[in-house]
């Protein structure tokens, strides 16, 4: 089979082509990535972990939540509880890859085939990172506002990719307006209205929203010749015991401004659906449940968007995003990283930086502020 439509993306595809290697950076220009969809294997969940109300790690699914379908026009008040029932995670604390590394240490036997010798073998993966970092890569060819910094360390053959906050992002975070602070709460409040703690309970909108809590899936997959291991937060799952196995039973929850004009619809398709698609396609989460809110933060309608239908929804938009461009750029970026980050050393960081309308460039740092693999991880993986 040679040609495949973009909407059957988890099947194998033709041999990937590389862009001509450049001595300088890597371009994010869309035209360079308009080719056949690369091989992206169906993501397989290899484990999960939970972070509790104090952000403590547990190698289990205790923070899993269960989706309870709301009324189509529910009138959820997303502002309720912002002042008195909200515990916000401290986002100035940079956790880097630490939780994923804890998960790896606790589940090492699943990831490395031991050789004849007593010493532990390297991990059988090329890349370890957060799903959110990959989402940023997927959307880069269409991003016009926010750049990124990605720190890469090669250790025992595996490339670890961890985001570094840009100066601009830090400024934005420290100077957020009160209205924006409150709007960030709305998404979590919507989760509280639609999620129960177990299969036989109902949501509790009177409880506290604590954004330290998280349930994360860990998936393995392959993008062309890149074997990936990444983790991402999952909002909830289908509570039907007959639902398919993870990640197919997972549901991503989103809120968005109510769509009232053709211009708003077009912007929703061109910008928001791209982010939603990229985030959920990567771990194989099949659907997004969206709450559309008015200006007062009241959810007026709820709609389900299957990930597999998003690329059809956008086809009528002029100059719209394409899944193949996103995936081919990510694939070429990972090849670029493999070619550059050659020294296997836990204290060396290759810092890749990108700003919209520029090429991706890099710099090398030894024993610097950018080193991110903790001693406890390096020691346990070496002994
Ligand atoms: P919405 O998705 O409804 O906007 P996620 O959707 O990834 O599960 O994230 C849950 C919520 O966290 C978001 O709800 C939003 O309120 C907040 N959030 C996530 N990423 C954010 C970001 N980069 N900036 C601001 N808010 C963010
Ligand atoms: Mg989430
Ligand atoms: Mg969500």
Image (cartoon, rainbow, N blue to C red):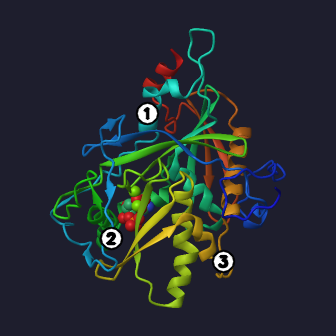
CA gap, disc 1 and disc 3: 40 Å
Q: Earlier in the sequence, mark 3 or mark 2?
A: 2
Specify which label sits upstream in the sequence, 2 or 1. Answer: 1
Nearer to the camera, 188 or 311: 311
The residue that disc 3 covers is: 315
Q: Is residue 80 left or right of residue 60?
A: left
x, y percent for residue 313: 59, 76
Which quarter shows the N terminus? bottom right
Q: Position of residue 162 (x, y in %)?
A: 52, 43
Q: CA distance from mark 2 to mark 1?
A: 32 Å
Tag 2 residue: 183
* Residue at (63% x, 10% y) in the render: 116
Q: Is residue 243 at least partly visible in the picture?
A: yes
Residue 171 shows in this picture:
no
Are the two marked residues, 1 and 3, in contact with CB atoms closer than 8 angstroms?
no
Quarter of the rendering containing residue 170: bottom left
Judged from the image, the secondary structure of the residue bearing numbered disc 1 is helix
- Which residue is at the front of the view, 17 or 240? 240
On the image, the x and y values in percent for residue 244 come to: 47, 51
* Residue bearing the label numbered 1: 103
Q: How many marks?
A: 3
């Amino acid at each position: 089979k040679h040609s495949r439509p973009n909407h059957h993306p988890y099947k194998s595809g033709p041999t990937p082509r590389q862009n001509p290697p450049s001595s300088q950076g890597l371009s994010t220009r869309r035209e360079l990535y308009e080719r056949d969809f690369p091989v992206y294997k169906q993501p397989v969940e290899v484990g999960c972990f939970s972070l509790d109300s104090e952000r403590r790690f547990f190698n289990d699914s205790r923070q899993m939540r269960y989706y309870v379908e709301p009324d189509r026009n529910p009138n959820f008040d997303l502002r309720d509880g912002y002042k008195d029932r909200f515990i916000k995670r401290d986002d100035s604390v940079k956790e880097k890859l630490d939780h994923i590394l804890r998960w790896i240490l606790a589940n090492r036997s699943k990831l490395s085939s031991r050789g004849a010798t007593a010493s532990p073998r390297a991990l059988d993966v090329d890349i370890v990172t957060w799903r959110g970092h990959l989402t940023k890569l997927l959307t880069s060819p269409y991003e016009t506002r926010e750049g990124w910094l990605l720190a890469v360390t090669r250790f025992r053959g595996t490339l670890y990719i961890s985001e570094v906050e840009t100066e601009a992002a830090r400024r934005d975070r420290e100077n957020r307006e009160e209205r924006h602070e409150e709007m960030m709460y709305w998404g979590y409040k919507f989760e509280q209205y639609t999620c129960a703690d177990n299969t036989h309970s109902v949501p509790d909108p009177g409880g506290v929203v604590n954004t330290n809590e998280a349930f994360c899936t860990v998936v393995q997959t392959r993008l062309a010749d890149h074997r990936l291991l990444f983790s991402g937060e999952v909002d909830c799952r289908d509570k039907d015991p007959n639902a398919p196995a993870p990640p197919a039973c997972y549901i991503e929850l989103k809120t968005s401004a109510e769509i009232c004009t053709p211009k708003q619809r077009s912007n929703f398709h061109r910008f928001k659906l791209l982010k939603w698609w990229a985030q959920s396609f990567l771990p194989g989460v099949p659907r997004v449940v969206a709450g559309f809110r008015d200006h007062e933060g009241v959810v007026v309608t709820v709609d389900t968007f299957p990930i597999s239908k998003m690329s059809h929804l956008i086809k009528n938009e002029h100059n719209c995003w394409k899944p193949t461009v996103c995936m081919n750029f990510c694939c070429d970026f990972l090849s670029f990283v493999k070619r550059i980050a050659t020294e296997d050393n836990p204290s060396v960081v290759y810092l890749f930086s990108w700003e919209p309308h520029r090429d991706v460039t890099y710099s090398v740092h030894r024993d610097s502020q950018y080193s991110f693999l903790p001693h406890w991880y390096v020691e346990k993986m070496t002994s």
